[in-house]
Amino acid sequence: MHSWRSGNGNLTRREWLRRFAGTAALTPFAKWNLQSPSHISAKHSPQELPPAGPKNFSDQDDAFLNDLEAANFRYFWEQANPDTGIVRDRCNVRTPDNNDLGSIASTGFGLTALCIGEKRGFISRAEARERVLNTLRFHWKKLPNHRGFFYHWANINTGERLWDSEVSSIDTAILLCGILTCRQHFEHSEISMLADEIFNRVDWTWLSEDTSILPHGWRPESGFLQYRWDNYSEMMMMYLLGLGSESHPLPAESWNAWQRTTFEYDGIRYIGSFAPLFVHQYSQAWFDFRGKRDRYTDYFRNSVIATDVHRRFCIDLAGEFPDYSDDLWGITASDSARGYVVWGGPPSTGPIDGTVVPCASAGSLPFLQNAAMRVLHTVKDRYGNGAWCQYGFVDAFNPLTNWYDHDVIGIDTGITMVMVENARTGFVWDTFMKNPEALRGMARAGFQSSPALEAQDRNPGSYPQPFGPSDPKPGQ
């Protein structure tokens, strides 16, 4: 995850959230309640949930989304070292930016972007294949790692560890998702061999040697980080990849070890966590949960509901921040006028001030197509002079104060591009889910497919309620 810089040092999104929650800085919101796991029917009209993708877009919408993806792709092509493949964590789009800070999570999105870019004709297959090969060769032979896990931050030119960063479990997982997407898309012998070697080197058993709840990472100076992936969040991809490993697999019980807490807002219930909207998007950028469920829930349906709740939450804030409306909503971890902030809700998290984060709605496009498209058009049409740049949307902006970010952040640009493509065609889902590691991980986690669920997930307006009366309680 992205970091922010302060007097407290360099913190990841997750470290920031832990410290934030630990100081009781979460402000309760009148319509929000944290509930013990239960299955009371939602007071939500199912017809209010719009259909999810991939769907047919109007010609106007499709042309707009294609321009957005092309701009996003330009970031990953231009802001990576072509020899190492490491992608910059962020880039200033107003002034020349030569920083060397790379992110392995941005690189994972970047590898996926190469597949999309080749498919859409933004670059030739030969150009994309060469960049992928350079990236995988460098990551296999030269990029420092520990037990197969990579350091969060690296110099884009040399691969040198930066900021005394941790060996990161979640950022390695995002990188692996990009690598596995390339293996399936290019069907090239050396790409396949390198992808196999990098994936099979990852020692999930070391990460879980004394616990079923995986740690956030490890530092050579101090050992494992104190924080654990113990609640629903973006970490689902990490557990599923570990379960899918043949060389060093996680034990099957690890999938049941983390908590699935039921939240309620305005009578609507869903599994969530004290975290911004991105936690409902990241795993679903690659893993296709449509038409599948484990013993706890249908996670695609859960993300649809959680996203609609977030939309309602933003609209309810309009009395305090009048820029928020059904045409302009979306708050997730991002830059702000005061620096990097982990914010969102419900419950209200962080110093919300009317800032809008375009990747919040763009990353929601497969879940709330019509609602998200309204926001994207509003941002481009009404605020495009400040909010649009050569790489698509800037990371954040505030219409109330006329503040527009000067930076683009790799992972926020990445979730935008990947989820736009999934909403348009399902390409990343279809490609990634050909990987035996992904199929094996979901099978070991107990996922089962259902034609009825698939029909619902392609048309969430048919959902009867967030949880069925016979569903086992989350966490049991």
Image: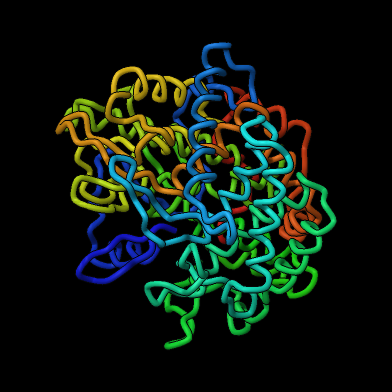
Question: In this image, 157 relative to 378: left or right?
Answer: right
Q: Please state the horizontal and vertical placement of residue 437, each as a whole percent of the image.
A: 77, 58
Left or right, 215 with reference to 404: right
Query: 96 left or right of 352?
Result: right
What's the coloring here? rainbow
Q: Residue furthest right?
A: 189
The percent position of residue 95, horizontal first and vertical second, equals 28, 44
Visible residue check, residue 476 = no
* Quarter of the figure that contains the C terminus: bottom right
Extreme-top residue of the structure: 59
Q: Which residue is at 69% across, 36% downward? A: 124
Q: Is residue 356 visible?
A: yes
> Looking at the image, is 168 positioned above or below residue 107?
below
Of the 4 image quadrants, the one containing the N terminus is bottom left
Q: Looking at the image, which is closer to me, 67 or 59?
A: 67
The residue drawn where x is 65% and y is 54% is 177
Q: Nearer the viewer, residue 36 or 57?
A: 57
* 242 shown above or below 452: below
Front residue of 20 and 377:
377
| Residue 327, horizontal then vertical, whole percent | 35, 21
Closest to the observer: 134 or 443? 134
Can you say whether 167 is above or below 439 in the image?
below
Up/down of 395 relative to 229, above or below: above
Residue at x-position 75% and y-position 67%: 245
Q: Residue, x 58% and y 22% (percent of image)?
A: 51
